[in-house]
Amino acid sequence: MNLYDLARGLHILAVIAWMAGLLFLPRLYAYDAEQADKPEPLRGEMRALLRLWQTRMLKIILNPAMVLALVLGLWLIHLGGAVILTQPWIWAKLVGVFLLLGWHGFLVAERKRISAGISTRTSKFWRMTNEVPFVLAVLMVLSVTLEWTF
């Protein structure tokens, strides 16, 4: 068994889980924001359920998948040797990784604002920004598969 291929496969699986959460959580936020226009009995019950799902998404899927993706990514860099860090494409991928980490942090902070009832984000905002992780994923996947040189 090739250790590098094992690490790469596990890394891809962790990234898939992380991306799934990054793409779905803003949708839950959009649904939450839409509850403001609903009558109180329905709004309260639905918001409680949505906020439970948001918390579970972060704690059970997003945060563990992010940690695994980062650890496995570092393992891949280690297994690839120092020469991998001299390649321009890895730096394009790492920029994408740092931007995804920033988006993840923004979603965590927004979860706290939603929970406190002080979020000002609209459903439209969440629907418009929902594709941010996918655009970053395109940059990262093409960087790795095409091994761009600048």
Image: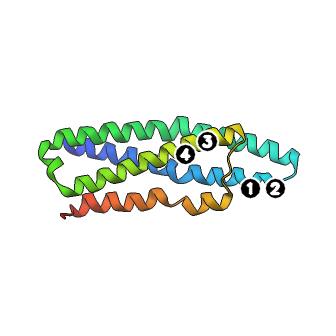
Residue labelled with disc 1? 34
Secondary structure category for the residue under label 1:
helix
Amino acid type at circle 3 is Arg
Amino acid type at circle 1 is Glu
**Disc on res. 37:** 2
Residues at discs 4 and 3 in contact (Cβ within 8 Å)? yes
Toward the viewer: 92 or 3?
92
Q: Earlier in the sequence, mark 3 or mark 1?
A: 1
Amino acid type at circle 4 is Leu
Per the model, the C-alpha gap separating discs 4 and 1 is 17 Å
Per the model, the C-alpha gap separating discs 3 and 2 is 20 Å
* Residue 22 visible from this viewpoint: yes
Residues at discs 3 and 1 in contact (Cβ within 8 Å)? no
Vertical side of 72 occupied by 19: above or below: below
Please tell me which residue is depicted at 53% across the width and 36% down the height of the picture. 60
Secondary structure category for the residue under label 4:
helix
Secondary structure category for the residue under label 3:
helix
